Image (cartoon, helix red, strand yellow):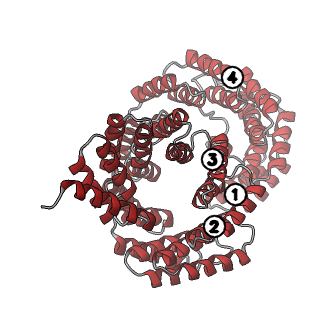
């Protein structure tokens, strides 16, 4: 059953528990003929006795006993529609829906205009998804009592669930004509406009709700949600802050505020909010996970590890948290302890592939590529079809320069998943390392066909053209598309500079290459490219400095000799000191 409908049935129970003659959301009116007739009929004393005993059991939470007492009262006073409806309300609280409907029908057989029975039936039909019958029930309520405000709300809610927003809005406008200051009418209208993504209208009505009640918590929360959907996090945070001013223990508002602060990289402020959440509910493990991850981002690894260990003490099977702990331990400089922690994640654990990949990463960093290969191969025996593990295996083959095996592994993935851009991209890279330019281009084009916004593939394809000095116009267009997607990427910026270099536009090349070097000053290839650009502009001292710096940055072995030759030639030009 949907959450909204559970709320609806809960509201009906409250309505009935108040005594069905007192109708929620009803305008003041004269007592109806039905009510007067009900008041004039005195129930038998025995029926009244069981009814009162039943009421006492309801208050004591003994619902099964209360049902038995009410059934006895009904058997002794079968002419009372009120008893049938109160019995129906107890069936509802126990989830005995068929008996709810039967009791309501019994009430209506006695009095076809008995409003509480129609109202309760409307809620039950709504909960069962029988919208047409629910609407008929609520319309019958309005026919009996045109000023029954809650029935308007329920009808509007049903139309909204049916995506008939025009009728939903029209129903609420009819309601507001009868009761212009009815807060719930304006609130529901705001919610429907929000569902329709008409956020300006929604916010206007929420503001009118707050004019009636500045502290109305649901409206403040909803406004925060609307601002989030509009991509206005600052306004959303302002609303959640208002909620917390009036309702400091509102867990959801504080959690949303913390999440938005985190998205805005305001880590310490987010951490402060999550610490308050932890104080409100120290056993809430999701809050503790978030705290641990924030501490990890702040490089406060020992504190993060404490949080993760606390969670694992309570929930040792939480694979995600064990994975986070493994990452934290590695950052603390304990690779062996990290590996031991990650090895505890079982093959059927949700985070198993990620754990294996991280173990392979650690072993790779430790120079233990053979062990990394064994770890991944063993994992694949446990989960042979896992794509993440197969990709990891291909990465390791690539690092071991076993390119044929890497390509074979990736080809197997692509055969099963032709649109797997990770595998397609990696195949392009592997073929590049095998000096197979034709296949590199083919697979990078394949990535772009599947995902036209794959910035790395756009850049790789464009740079490949530039390196070969071919299709330079297309190369420029591809790289500019990539740069639009990743405007602060030093590597893509370098690619654009290299295109201009190959086109003979050396001033334009140096402009972009200098920017690339500022973005990534520790990359030997970018540094060498800038040196090449300076040479073309006859800035030989600057070029020498760049080449020397590129050599210090430990380039690939095949580039070391090239750099040394360039440096020697420039020094030779300068002559002996």
In this image, 255 relative to 144: left or right?
Answer: left
- SS class, disc 2: helix
- Percent x, y of residue 506: 35, 37
Q: Which disc, if any, is residue 145?
A: 4
In this image, 529 relative to 466: left or right?
Answer: left
Residue at the disc numbered 2: 403
Q: CA distance from mark 3 to mark 1?
A: 83 Å
The residue that appears at 85% across and 38% down in the rendered structure is 105
Query: Outermost residue toward the top?
Result: 177
Q: CA distance from mark 2 to mark 3?
A: 17 Å
Categorize mark 3 by other alpha carbons within 10 Å: few (<14), some (14-19), many (20+).
many
Verify CB contact (< 8 Å) between mark 1 and mark 4: no
Q: CA distance from mark 3 to mark 4?
A: 74 Å
Residue at the disc numbered 1: 53
**Looking at the image, is mark 4 or mark 2 nearer the viewer?**
2
User: Disc 2 or 3, which lies upstream in sequence?
Assistant: 2
- Is any atom of residue 540 visible in this view? yes
């Amino acid at each position: 059953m949907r959450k909204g409908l559970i709320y609806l049935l809960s509201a009906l129970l409250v309505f009935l528990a108040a005594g069905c003659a007192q109708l929620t959301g009803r305008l003041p009116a004269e007592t109806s003929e039905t009510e007067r007739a009900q008041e004039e009929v005195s129930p038998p004393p025995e029926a009244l006795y069981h009814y009162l005993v039943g009421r006492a059991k309801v208050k004591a939470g003994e619902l099964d006993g209360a049902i038995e007492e009410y059934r006895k009262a009904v058997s002794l006073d079968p002419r009372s529609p009120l008893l049938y409806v109160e019995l129906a309300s107890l069936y509802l609280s126990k989830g005995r829906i068929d008996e709810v409907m039967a009791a309501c029908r019994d009430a209506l057989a006695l009095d076809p205009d008995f409003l509480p029975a129609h109202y309760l039936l409307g809620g039950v039909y709504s909960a069962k998804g029988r919208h047409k019958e629910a609407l008929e029930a609520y319309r019958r309520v309005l026919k009996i009592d045109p000023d029954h405000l809650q029935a308007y709300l329920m009808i509007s809610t049903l139309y909204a669930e049916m995506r008939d927003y025009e009728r939903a809005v029209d129903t609420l406008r009819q309601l507001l004509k009868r009761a212009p200051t009815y807060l719930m009418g304006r609130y529901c209208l705001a919610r429907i406009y929000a569902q329709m993504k008409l956020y300006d209208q929604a916010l206007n009505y929420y503001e009118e709700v707050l004019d009636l009640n500045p502290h109305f918590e649901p409206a403040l929360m909803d406004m925060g949600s609307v601002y989030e959907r509009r991509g206005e996090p600052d306004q959303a945070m302002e609303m959640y802050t208002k909620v917390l001013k009036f309702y400091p223990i509102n867990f959801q508002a504080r959690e949303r505020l913390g999440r938005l602060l985190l998205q805005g990289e305001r880590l310490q402020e987010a951490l402060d909010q999550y610490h308050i959440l932890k104080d409100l509910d120290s056993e809430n493990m999701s809050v503790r996970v978030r705290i641990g991850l924030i501490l990890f981002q702040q490089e406060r690894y020992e504190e993060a590890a404490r949080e993760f260990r606390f969670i694992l003490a309570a929930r040792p099977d939480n694979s995600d948290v064990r994975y986070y702990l493994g990452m934290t331990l590695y950052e603390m400089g304990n690779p062996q302890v990290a590996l031991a922690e990650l090895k505890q994640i079982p093959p059927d654990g949700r985070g198993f592939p990620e754990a294996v990949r991280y173990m392979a990463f650690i072993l790779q960093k430790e120079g233990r590529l053979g062990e990394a290969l064994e770890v991944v191969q063993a994992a694949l025996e446990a989960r042979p079809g896992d794509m993440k593990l197969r990709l990891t295996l291909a990465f390791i083959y690539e690092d071991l320069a076993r390119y044929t095996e890497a390509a074979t592994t990736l080809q197997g993935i692509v055969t099963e998943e032709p649109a797997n851009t990770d595998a397609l991209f990696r195949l392009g890279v592997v073929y590049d390392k095998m000096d197979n330019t034709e296949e590199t281009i083919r697979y990078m084009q394949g990535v772009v066909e599947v995902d036209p916004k794959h910035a790395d593939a756009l850049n790789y394809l464009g740079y490949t053209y530039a390196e070969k000095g071919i299709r330079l116009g297309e190369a420029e267009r591809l790289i500019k598309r990539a740069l639009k997607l990743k405007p602060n990427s030093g590597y893509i910026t370098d690619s654009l500079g290299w295109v201009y270099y190959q086109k003979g536009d050396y001033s334009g090349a140096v402009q972009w290459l200098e920017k690339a070097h500022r973005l990534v000053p520790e990359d030997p290839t970018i540094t060498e490219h800038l040196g090449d650009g300076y040479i073309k502009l006859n800035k030989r001292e600057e070029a020498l400095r760049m080449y020397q710096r590129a050599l210090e940055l430990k380039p690939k072995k095949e580039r070391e000799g090239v750099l040394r030759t360039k440096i020697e030639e420039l020094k030779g030009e300068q002559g002996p000191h």
